[in-house]
Amino acid sequence: MHLGKAWPWISTVARLGLAAVFLIAGGLKVTDLAESGRAVNAYRLMDYDTAKLVGAIQPFLEIAVGLLLLIGLAVRLSAAISALLLVVFIAGIISAWARGLQIDCGCFSKGGDLAAGRNTAYGLDIARDTGFLLLAGILLWKPRTRFSMDGLLMGER
Amino acid sequence: MSKGNRDRERSAAKRIVEQQKAAERRRAVTIWTSVAVVGVLLIAGLIGWGVLSRQESNDASTLTTPSVAVDDGTAFAVGTGPVTVDLYEDFMCPICHQFEIAADATIDQLVADKKITVRYHPVAILDRASNGTEFSTRSAGAAAAAAVGGKFSEFHKVMYDNQPEENSDGLSNAKIIELGKSVGLGDDFATAVNDKTYTAWATKVTETFSTRGYTGTPTIVVAGKQLQGTGGTIPTAAQLSEAVTAAAG
């Protein structure tokens, strides 16, 4: 199968999909930064003051990355940063899983400890994040997309 | 050299110059868009940091600590026994309600027997579960007002008896005031609830809870040691009694 001409379109779908992921993830958290900080704290990887700062900055970073992908500015770099963030998230979930912590990953929710008796879904969370990582991978490999600032600035049709 | 050859060479040279120009342009665009991306991310990070610091200084300036609070002003003590039992609960948390139903009589008995001092920490970690009305924070603040009015235990009980469903709007301030009045609280209580007098205080209690490394409710701590049931579940009333007996020595 010859995909040559289709790549910019495939990449465009990947770019907009990944943009939506980051905008939604950031948008859900940005309204309650204290909760976002507690979600980070639940991973028990840093002291609470650090977790609070990370929790406050993270949603804004996610929204910024989402917007950059949406308009398609420096797509390869934006995709690399997305991939880095996703790798950090996946590592965090694996470490929580390995330590037997009962937490909600907080990817699309505010996270935090789960109430007793509710099951964690670490495997699913990791699978989902890996899927997003795949989208970032497509963009790293083929960053040329349609309807992008990059294309506009490069003078492409 | 023929004219045709010269033309070909000239157009080849022109093409090379054009390609070089295009390559240069791509390079410049790549550099400047990368700079822009880094700039945008820096600004986003600074916004997050700025919003957090503003919230914190705002909380610090509006903080009213209830006069009757213990444990650095973050809890309300019930009883006078030698063993301290710390209970961190959110009024929206259904598991807290289950724990209250299961252990309430035992706790009352231990208090009456002068075996324990219960320190209630009304934390607010479930604001997300009340459709934006921040029921957890409002109810924790109301509990402070009830404590100032001398009716903490009664208010605590009536709030759990009337616990709203998670992901509902929670109880309105009017309903909270009505419940407060039903246990003998007066107009000062109503004013504190309506004026959000203890909102910043509820945040402080929650922060103290997080700083201590606790992340879920209910968190039950007996004589400084977190008590959990089998497999990380909520302890039963019997397990609580045992832990108290063990701590009393």
Image (cartoon, rainbow, N blue to C red):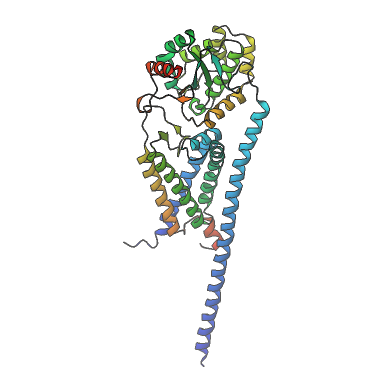
Image check: A18 left or right of B144?
A: left
The mark total stands at: 0
**For the view shown, which residue lies furthest in the bottom direction?**
B1
**For the view shown, which residue lies furthest in the right direction?**
B61
**For the view shown, which residue lies furthest in the front direction?**
B249
- Give the percent coordinates (x, y) of residue A120: 37, 34
At x 46%, y 47%, the residue is A88
**For the view shown, which residue lies furthest in the left direction?**
A1
Q: Is residue A140 visible?
A: yes
Q: Is residue B199 above or below residue A58?
A: above
- Give the percent coordinates (x, y) of residue B215: 48, 30
- Give the percent coordinates (x, y) of residue B204: 59, 27
Q: Is residue A31 visible?
A: no
Return the residue nearer the eye: B5 or A25.
Answer: A25
At x 54%, y 7%, the residue is B182
Image check: B70 left or right of A16?
A: right
Q: Quadrant of the C terminus of chain B?
A: top left
At x 59%, y 17%, the residue is B144
Return the residue nearer the eye: B167 or B183.
Answer: B183
Q: Is residue B122 above or below residue A145?
A: above
Return the residue nearer the eye: A124 or B3.
Answer: A124
Quarter holding residue B233: top left
- Give the percent coordinates (x, y) of residue B32: 59, 60
Return the residue nearer the eye: A62 or B25.
Answer: A62
Q: Is residue A96 above or below residue B34?
A: above
